[in-house]
Amino acid sequence: TLILEEYPNFNMFGETWVHGMPNQVWFTEDNGFNKPFNSNLPNVTDFQWYFSALEALNTPMGWTSGVSKLYYTLADDFMYKNPYYNVTFLDNHDVDRFYGVVGNNIKKFKSGISLLMTSRGIPSIYYGTEILMNKNASYHPNVREDFPGGWIDDKINKFTKSGRTE
């Protein structure tokens, strides 16, 4: 609260790895829930959007599955003070890399990036997603590996055009 009083235009968000829209909304500021706690967080990492986006890309459409899951998630946006402040993402430091989650399918990858960049919210692209880094989180350091290049011992340098593939 003190930060926002001193810097009213400062933006911050909290990581909320929970399941269910009400559980996630609970962590946002002034959400209207009858509770004594107010996080004062204008936005959160939108895990509900993340879960539903992956389902939309990987599961056939049904009444409540596939792209319908994304529809129902977005339909619950009324619970937020402002869902446009939520941070949307397709991978991060705790979950499997997005390219692997869509089965190394470049069409699904491009669809997911398009969805991320055109959906409501503040899109977050985790480093390495742009070069199709593909590790899973079963061994946590996998998804936090260094970006290839920039260090003397790196055999590949993705910072240079010659170090990248088409």
Image (cartoon, rainbow, N blue to C red):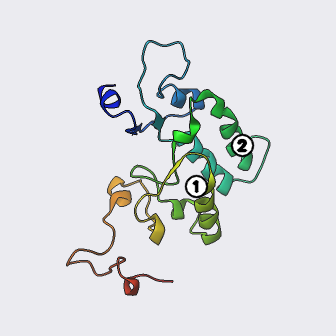
Q: Secondary structure at mark 1?
A: helix
Residue 164 location (% of width, % of height) = 42, 81
Q: Is residue 73 left or right of residue 139?
A: right
Tell me which numbered mark, 1 or 2, is placed earlier along the sequence.
2
Which quadrant would residue 110 be assigned to in this image? bottom right
Label 2: few (<14), some (14–19) or many (≥20) C-alpha neighbours in 10 Å: some
Residue 102 location (% of width, % of height) = 59, 62
Q: Is residue 151 left or right of residue 22?
A: left
Q: Secondary structure at mark 2?
A: helix
Which residue type carries mark 1? Leu
Residue 38 location (% of width, % of height) = 43, 20
The residue under the point 20% across, 78% down is: 152
Mark 2 lies on residue: 71
Instruction: In the rendered view, tell whether residue 100 sits above or below residue 19.
Output: below
Which quadrant would residue 5 be assigned to in this image? top left
Residue 19 location (% of width, % of height) = 54, 34
The residue under the point 38% across, 58% down is: 143
- Cα distance in 3D space between marks 1 and 2: 14 Å
**Going by the picture, which residue comes out furthest to the left?**
152
Which residue type carries mark 2? Tyr
Q: Nearer the viewer, residue 24 or 41?
A: 41
Label pair 1/2, CB-CB below 8 angstroms: no
The residue under the point 58% across, 65% down is: 103
Disc tally is 2
Mark 1 lies on residue: 116
Label 1: few (<14), some (14–19) or many (≥20) C-alpha neighbours in 10 Å: many
